[in-house]
Amino acid sequence: MDQARVEIQVLSSLSQIDASDWDACACPEAARGGRPYDPFTTHRFLSALEQSGSVGRGTGWQPQYLACYLEGDLIACAPLYAKGHSQGEYVFDHNWAHAYEQAGGRYYPKLQIAVPFTPATGRRFLVRPEYEEIGTSALVQGAVQLASDNQLSSLHVTFCTEREVKNGSDIGLMSRSTQQFHWLNNGYETFDDFLAALSSRKRKNIRKERRQAQGFGGIIETYTGADLRPEHWDAFWEFYQDTGSRKWGSPYLTRAFFDIVHETMADDMALVLAERDGVPVAGALNFIGSDVLYGRYWGCAEHHPCLHFELCYYQAIDLAIEMGLARVEAGAQGEHKLARGYLPAETHSLHWVADPGFRAAVEQYLEAERAAVDEEIEILTRYGPFKRTYVEEQE
């Protein structure tokens, strides 16, 4: 198929692309009504970010969506943003920016193919089935050309899949490895089945933490779909603001975002609330994929022992087992997750740097970093909470 026949457009708003056309590239597996593997690249999620003002003017995330057309049909697209900073990415390049500017360059703005504020692995080069090769090539070439034409320092593709890393590396992008902690469902039918795979000491500790958390003086409920109500978001917004102000200085998402996803994505979410006398005192928000539960946000109005672990980690495991999901991704960072059954997992990104000298230095750094990440994952897995036989099976 002739690459020259592909037309590439840069769009400032998702309203310029029909939702069904975008989703035919982003989540073709959902065409027959099933769940998208990754809810974060759907038209409805990215539109909620845009419509709510969470991205756009004044946020440092300016939409520059890539759309590739072949004979008038959309065959590939990507959530591309011009970035004026490195916040909300979770694959940190602050040191690169500092070094680039110390050498007299201008690192920002840069281009980022990503889901804003969402450290969850998924496809970033969104291509219709049967157009993978030409679509991926067109997206990469289009993004690099856009950066080059505008004399931008770099292009970054964060939390992409292993397959995309291979394809991107084959056409000249640099790959980077980082890590998160994921819970893996080894065919468990109950939470006790999961506990049985742990060492005795870790098993006892988790049971103790669950008893402490559930003794906070109220009940814990999980809401999804039609059970979600507008007042739930009033409470959760207060929790989210508190966490956001402590972690990031100010929340990334606006209040309007939660109202929009309530209308468009209720079936894609599971909100876990700790309630006393009908009043929520803490909550954790999860998004639901076809095979993965994604833990995203947590917050509280009151502090109770182990309630964070219960709502974010143990309730997520319960829900994943109940729904038959293969994995829980609990977000970025946090070695404390290891003791609670979440094992280190490699995550990936791709990078292009315009300056040849700086690109060579970054490539050398990435090679050393990959080796360090591999070693750390191996060590952490061996010191995890599971019985030795389980660790050996994972290896």
Image (cartoon, rainbow, N blue to C red):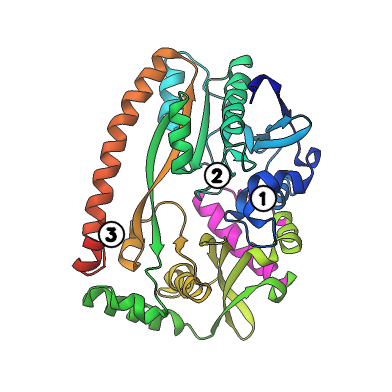
Q: Residue 269 falls in which quadrant of the image?
A: bottom right
Amino acid type of disc 3? Gln
Between 303 and 229, the one lying in front of the other is: 229
Q: Which residue is mark 2?
A: 123
Q: Position of residue 1 (x, y in %)?
A: 63, 26
Residue beneath label 3, please? 394
Q: Mark 3–mark 1 contact, CB under 8 Å?
A: no
| First-in-chain label (3 vs 1) | 1
**Residue nearer the viewer, 231 or 114:** 114
Query: Is disc 2 placed on a helix, strand or loop?
Result: loop
Query: Within the magenta stretch, is there residue 103?
Result: no
Provide residue 46's location: percent of width, then percent of height. Answer: 68, 47
**Is the stretch drawn in magenta largely helix, strand or loop?**
helix
Magenta span of residues: 231-255
* 99 relative to 395, above or below: above
Mark 2 Cα-neighbour bin, 10 Å: few <14, some 14–19, many ≥20: many
Q: Is residue 390 in view?
A: yes
Please rate how many residues cluster around mark 1, counting C-alpha atoms within 10 Å: few if below 14, some from 14 to 19, many from 20.
many
Direction from residue 180 to residue 67 in the image, left or right: right
The picture places residue 279, in percent across and down from the top left corner, at 63, 79
Residue positioned most to the left = 388
Instruction: Say if 4 sits above or below 41 in the image.
Output: above
Q: Is residue 356 above or below residue 61?
A: above
242 part of magenta stretch: yes
Residue wearing tag 1: 42
- The residue sitting at 24% across, 44% down in the picture is 375
